[in-house]
Amino acid sequence: MLLAVDVGNTNLTIGLFDGSRRLAAWRLKTDPGQTVDGWGALFHNLVSLARLDLGTVRGFVFSSVVPQLDASISGMAKRYLGLEPFKVTAATRTGLGLRVDKPEEVGADRIVNSVAAAERYGCPCIAVDFGTAITFDAISKDREYLGGIICPGIQVSSQALVRRTAQLPQIDLRRPETVIGTNTVGSLQSGLYFGMLGMLDGILDKMLDALGRDTAVVATGGQSEVLAPASRYIQSVDRGLTLEGLRLVWNLNRG
């Protein structure tokens, strides 16, 4: 079995694969202070609760945008799995050409998202990831990563507004019943939801002008299912896109 982990700024996504079949997946809060032993106990408990055996794992692949956790994640793989961890970076063989100015600056999560989007949905395609930041990644018809766009995420935008105002409450993202809010919470929800939706479709419209209107658009990430159904351009929601990208990159490099 293969254990795949994506370490994000807000969430840690974990998947366990048997060949191409995903047996289990988990999404946890990222803990920057976690230790090797803490990771070991956490992974053991998760896999045991799924009635699976951590001892049958034969591969460990991970991507990370939190450098301070790389050592403890790698240490867990070595100590508790007896495996050499495989970390995906811009230098990793992925099957995609990186047509950007500085490939080393591209986040590993964006690379694996692009690999999975190209494989599952064909090229050209756009992968939209709703995380701490909302990222838009463009892959050409020739399977080349062309770059993308990075915007503030939903929670980042909401929290920034609340911190800078004295009397506004924290709200969750949800589609409001009406566009025009009749109270403070309704006004906030309308502004956040339709503001994000307008930004989302405005950016995708411009990207489709550049890539072609036949470009596939897929969304992933924790809040993708809230906004994607209202988008004019997002065709698919794939919560497992990042983990699938890690699996594909592992398979390409394990020989």
Image (spheres, rainbow, N blue to C red):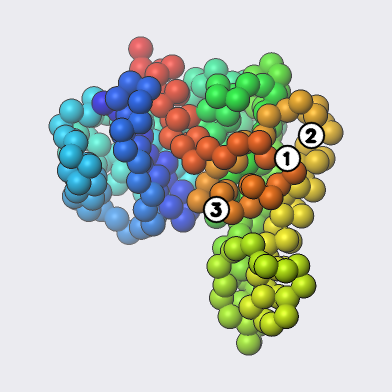
Question: Would you call the spot at circle 3 few (<14 residues within 10 Å), some (14-19), or many (20 or more)?
Answer: some
Give the spatial CA distance, label 1 vs label 3: 16 Å
Q: Which mark is residue 71?
A: none
Of the numbered discs 3 and 2, the one sitting upstream in the chain is: 2
Q: Which residue matches tag 3?
A: 223
Disc 1 is placed on an element classified as loop
**Residue at (19, 36) in percent of width and height:** 52
Local SS, label 3: loop
196 w.r.t. 242: above or below = below
In the image, 10 versus 241, the foreground residue is 241
> In the picture provided, is 62 more to the left or to the right than 207?
left
Label 3 is placed on what type of residue?
A: Gln
- For badge 2, the amino acid type reads Leu
How packed is label 1: few (under 14 Cα within 10 Å), some, or many (20 or more)?
some
Q: Which numbered tag is attached to residue 233?
A: 1
- Which residue in the rendered view is the most extreme toward the bottom? 167
Q: Is residue 74 visible?
A: yes
Q: Nearer the viewer, mark 2 or mark 1?
A: 1
- Left or right? Give the position of 141 relative to 45: right
Residue 17 percent location from the top left of the image: 32, 29
Where in the figure is residue 244, as x and y percent of width and height? 45, 30
Give neighbour class at mark 2: few <14, some 14-19, many 20+ (Cα, 10 Å): some
- First reached walking from the N terminus: tag 2 or tag 1: 2
Which residue is painted at 46% across and 56% down in the image?
Answer: 10
Residue for point 57% across, 48% down: 224
Q: Quadrant of the C terminus?
A: top left
Q: Image quadrant of residue 215?
A: top right
* Type of amino acid under label 1: Tyr
Number of numbered discs present?
A: 3
Q: Which residue is mark 2?
A: 208
**Residue 48 position within the rendered picture, expressed as x and y whole percent measured from the top left:** 17, 43
